[in-house]
C-alpha cells in the first residue's frame, strides 16, 4: 500500500536552480521500479510504527491493569505524553535544525485557524474514545471504532486528499465489513456509548485529514513530522488536560496512594513519563507514514496491525476465534490486498516527470510541470517549456525516447511565443505520486 517514490522528492524549482534541466516522463518500468523502492521504505516506517505501538500497548496494559501497577487514569497519562512529545520535538529542532526545523513558522492566524483545530480534534478523539470505554465493552468499542476507516475516506474525499473512485469505496467497505466480522461476538448494546465512539471515529477521520494537510503545507513550516508534533502537541496536551480534569477528577487523583510521599510520587512520575518516549516515536512514525502515503493508507495500516495482533494472539496465546471471526480476518486480508493493488495500478498509470538523474520531480505547492507537445504546465519560478533546442534533441534521440524539456525563466520571451499555461488539477495525489491531470492548450 506504500506508494511514494522512495527517494526524497526533487522539487521543481530545485531541479532548475542550477540552470536548464532535462526532464522526461517516467516509463512504465521506471514507475514500477520507483514504486517497489518506495514500498520497501514505507514498509520499514510501518514496521517501526508497529513495533512502537505494540511495546506501548504492552506497557499500558501493565500500567493500567489492577493486577500490576494499576494506575486508573489513562487520559492523564496521555496528557503527560503530549508534553513529552513537545520536549523531544523541541530537542530535535534545536539539535538538528537543518533536518527538523523548516524555514518557516506558522503565522498566528494560520496557527489559530489550521493547527489548533487539528490539535483539538485529536484531543477530543482520544477523550471521547476513553469515555466511551466506561459504558461499553472493548469488543463493542472495536466494532464501532472500525467505522473510522469510513470517516477517514469521507474526509479524504472532502478535502481532495483522495481522488473519488467507486472502486476505492468498494474496497474500503469490504475491509470495514471484514473488521466487523473479525471482532463480532455477543455484546451488550449501549446507545450512549455508541454515540460517543462514533463521534470519536468522526473526529479521528477529521484530525488525520487535517494532519495530512498540515504536513503538505511548506508555507506554514509544518511539512516536517517533528515540526508538526512541536506545534500541535501543546494544544493537544491542554485539550486533554481539560478533559482529564473533568473525567479523572484530579483532586481524587493527587490524593491517591500514587502520590503519597516524595519517593512514591517520583516513582509514579517516572513510570508515567517513560512511555512518553515510545509514544513520541510512534507518533513520529505515524506522521512520516501520512506524509509519504496519506491518511487512507495509514488507516489501512492500522487495520493490518489489528489483523496481525488477532492472528498472533490466536496462534501463540490460544485466543479462540469463531468461524465468523476467521471469515472476517480472511475478508479483511483480501480487502487490504485489493487496496494495495489499487494504489499500485494508480501509481503505474499516473504521469511522473523525472529529472536527469531519474528522481521524481514534485512541487508540494501545486506548481506545474511541462508535459508533452500541446500540454503546458506552470512553475512558480522558471517554467519548463519545449524550446527549439529540445525539439532538435528529440530529432537526434533514438526512436521511442521520452520528449525533453528545459527551463526558461524569461517571461517576455514566453509572451512573444504566445504560450498559454494551464494549471493542472491534483498535481500531488493522495498516494504521494505526482499525478498530472492535463488539458490541451486552449481548452
Image (spheres, helix red, strand yellow):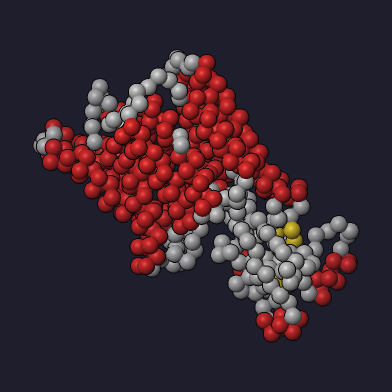
Give the quadrant of the N terminus.
top right
Q: Is residue 418 above or below residue 230?
A: below
The image shows residue 249 at horizontal and vertical percentages of: 17, 40
Between residue 314 and residue 69, name the one nearer to us.
Answer: 314
Quadrant of residue 127 within the rendered picture? top left
Q: Is residue 429 above or below residue 408?
A: above
* Residue shown at the point (47%, 30%) measured from the top left: 306
The image shows residue 359 at horizontal and vertical percentages of: 67, 57
Q: How many marks?
A: 0
Quadrant of residue 71 within the rendered picture? top left
Give the quadrant of the C terminus.
bottom right
* Residue shown at the point (62%, 33%) measured from the top left: 337
Q: Is residue 328 above or below residue 397?
A: above
In this view, the residue farthest toward the front is 191
The image shows residue 300 at horizontal and vertical percentages of: 53, 38
* Residue shown at the point (31%, 54%) measured from the top left: 235
Q: Is 71 left or right of 141, judged from the image as shown?
A: left
Whether residue 225 is visible to the viewer of this picture, yes or no, is no
Between residue 407 and residue 300, name the one nearer to us.
Answer: 300
Q: Is residue 373 above or below residue 399?
A: below
The image shows residue 136 at horizontal and vertical percentages of: 32, 28
Between residue 44 and residue 117, name the one nearer to us.
Answer: 117
* Residue shown at the point (28%, 50%) measured from the top left: 239
Whether residue 109 is visible to the viewer of this picture, yes or no, is yes
Q: Is 355 left or right of 207, judged from the image as shown?
A: right
Quadrant of residue 406 within the rendered picture? bottom right
Amino acid at each position: 500500500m506504500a506508494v511514494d517514490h522512495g527517494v526524497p522528492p526533487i522539487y521543481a524549482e530545485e531541479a532548475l536552480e542550477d540552470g536548464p534541466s532535462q526532464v522526461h516522463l517516467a516509463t512504465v518500468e521506471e514507475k514500477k521500479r520507483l514504486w517497489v523502492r518506495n514500498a520497501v521504505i514505507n514498509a520499514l516506517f510501518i514496521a517501526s510504527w508497529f513495533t512502537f505501538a505494540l511495546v506501548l500497548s504492552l506497557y499500558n496494559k501493565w500500567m493500567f491493569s489492577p493486577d500490576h501497577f494499576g494506575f486508573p487514569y489513562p487520559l492523564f497519562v496521555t496528557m503527560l505524553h503530549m508534553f513529552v512529545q513537545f520536549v523531544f520535538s523541541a530537542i530535535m529542532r534545536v539539535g538538528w535544525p537543518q533536518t527538523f526545523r523548516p524555514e518557516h513558522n506558522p503565522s498566528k492566524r494560520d496557527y489559530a485557524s489550521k493547527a489548533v483545530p487539528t490539535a483539538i480534534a485529536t484531543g477530543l478523539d482520544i477523550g471521547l474514545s476513553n469515555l466511551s470505554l466506561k459504558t461499553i465493552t472493548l469488543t463493542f468499542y472495536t466494532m464501532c471504532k472500525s467505522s473510522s476507516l469510513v470517516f477517514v475516506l469521507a474526509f479524504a474525499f472532502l478535502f481532495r486528499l483522495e481522488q473519488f473512485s467507486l472502486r476505492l469505496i468498494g474496497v474500503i467497505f469490504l475491509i470495514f465489513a471484514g473488521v466487523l466480522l473479525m471482532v463480532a461476538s455477543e455484546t451488550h448494546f449501549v446507545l450512549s456509548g455508541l454515540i460517543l465512539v462514533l463521534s470519536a471515529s468522526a473526529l479521528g477521520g477529521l484530525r488525520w485529514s487535517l494532519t495530512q494537510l498540515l504536513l503538505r503545507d511548506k508555507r506554514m513550516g509544518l511539512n516536517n513530522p517533528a515540526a508538526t508534533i512541536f506545534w500541535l502537541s501543546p494544544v493537544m496536551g491542554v485539550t486533554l488536560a481539560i478533559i482529564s480534569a473533568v473525567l479523572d477528577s484530579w483532586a481524587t487523583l493527587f490524593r491517591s496512594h500514587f502520590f503519597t510521599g516524595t519517593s512514591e510520587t517520583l516513582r509514579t512520575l517516572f513510570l508515567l513519563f517513560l512511555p512518553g518516549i515510545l509514544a513520541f516515536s510512534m507518533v513520529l512514525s505515524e506522521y512520516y507514514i501520512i506524509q509519504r502515503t496519506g491518511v487512507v493508507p495509514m488507516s489501512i495500516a492500522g487495520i493490518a496491525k489489528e489483523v496481525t495482533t488477532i492472528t498472533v494472539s490466536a496462534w501463540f496465546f490460544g485466543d479462540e476465534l469463531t468461524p465468523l471471526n476467521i471469515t472476517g480476518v480472511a475478508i479483511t486480508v483480501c480487502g487490504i490486498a485489493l487496496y494495495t493493488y489499487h494504489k499500485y495500478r494508480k501509481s503505474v498509470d499516473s504521469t511522473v516527470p523525472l529529472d536527469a538523474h531519474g528522481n521524481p520531480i514534485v512541487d508540494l505547492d501545486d506548481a506545474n510541470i511541462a508535459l508533452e507537445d500541446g500540454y503546458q504546465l506552470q512553475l512558480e519560478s522558471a517554467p519548463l517549456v519545449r524550446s527549439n533546442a529540445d525539439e532538435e534533441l528529440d530529432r537526434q534521440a533514438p526512436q521511442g525516447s521520452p520528449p525533453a524539456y528545459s527551463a526558461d525563466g524569461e517571461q517576455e520571451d514566453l509572451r512573444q511565443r504566445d504560450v498559454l499555461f494551464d494549471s493542472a488539477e491534483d498535481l500531488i495525489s493522495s498516494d504521494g505520486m505526482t499525478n498530472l491531470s492535463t488539458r490541451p492548450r486552449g481548452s
